[in-house]
Image: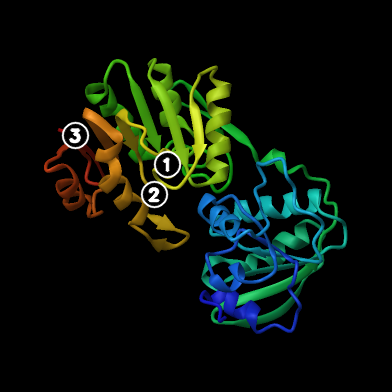
Amino acid sequence: MNAETPVCQLLQRQDADYRGWLWVAPPRDSWLEGGEGMLLAGDQIVLETWRARDRPAFSPFEDDAPPAPPGVVLFWPKAHALGEWWLLWLCARLPVGTPLQVVGENQGGIKRVLKVLAALGLGCRKVDSARRCTLFASRLDRVGIDPDAAWTSFEAEGLSLASHPGVFGHGKLDDGTRLLLERLPDVLPSKGEVLDMGCGDGVLAAWLARRGLSTTAIDVNGFAVEAARRTLAANDLGGEVLAGDVFAGLEDRRFDAIVSNPPFHQERAIDYGPAGRLIREAPAHLRPGGRLVLVANAFLPYPDLLERAFGSFEVLADDRRFRVYAATRG
């Protein structure tokens, strides 16, 4: 089976025996999924894909830790601070001396890994480069930095928000979310059940819970799920936070409103898939009269999707950068 992504194509041409190795935050690639390695990731889709095939898959936020592997490959993420966190986590949790390889696309900043590893006191050498990707090798060691130090908090909308590298809006309130929050009081019910889809750090979930609404939040990103849970706890608010891909896991549950600032990127690529599924499937998860309220960059092609799914919609706000849309189930 041939690798599909450039980073995996670079790995596939190596002489290394990767059987039993731990793949950390990899892309979706059938070459990896069909091999004999283990997975460590925070992405619920990737975790479920591996587990559906009875492959060993672990999350840093679950109790089960991966057994000591013969080696580790870290796929360097778009968010460099998240890549640094993965390095700290691996150095703190896995045996000293475990072989480590770090691979990534040149446009994604993989060459910065040299400085990151040097700052941690870890040696490094370049192994190979091809397909506009580079592969480095090192070994894990104790670096004396607790990965939990990456968790920070900030204040917004009178709430204390937990923040972690790799979670949308890390360390600040997104301007689109701010615009959405300005309009929500005009369109939300005074009581009932509300779903925060793609919850990120949990600012919407906490805002909704503070208004007395029964709040459920969901995100495919394990780091976001943990952040939202910490945000609710920090503000002494109740609410359910789930890991899931759009409506997966919610089955036939219905809500009085669904609110969202949906993502449209997968790493550096534009991906309308999750937002499209959110809009298409929202009517089936709303009670009669229930509303979908979402904010999006003004250039995104959501009006057509809303028209097809709901028959009509309204624009609640438009500041030329972002638009707030509302659609009601009949």
> Label 1 is placed on what type of residue?
Gly
Inspect this view and state whether residue 296 appears: no
State which tag comes first along the sequence, 1 or 3: 1
Residue that lies at the very extreme toward the right in this rendered image: 96
Q: CA distance from mark 1 to mark 3?
A: 20 Å
Inspect this view and state whether residue 58 appears: yes
Q: Is residue 314 above or below residue 157?
A: below
Task: Name the residue: 31% across, 16% down.
Answer: 191
Q: Which mark is residue 19?
A: none
> Label 2 is placed on what type of residue?
Pro
Classify the position of the C terminus by image quarter: top left
**Residue marked by disc 2:** 263
State which tag comes first along the sequence, 1 or 2: 1
Please tell me how crowded label 3 is: few (under 14), some (14-19), or many (20+) other residues with Cα within 10 Å.
many
Task: Name the residue: 52% across, 46% down.
Answer: 221
**Residue marked by disc 3:** 329
Q: CA distance from mark 2 to mark 3?
A: 23 Å
* Label 2 secondary element: loop
Closest to the observer: 252 or 211?
252
Instruction: Return the x and y of residue 58 as percentages of the image width and height.
Output: 67, 51
Instruction: Return the x and y of residue 100 as percentages of the image width and height.
Output: 76, 66
Which quadrant holds residue 212? top left
**Residue marked by disc 1:** 198
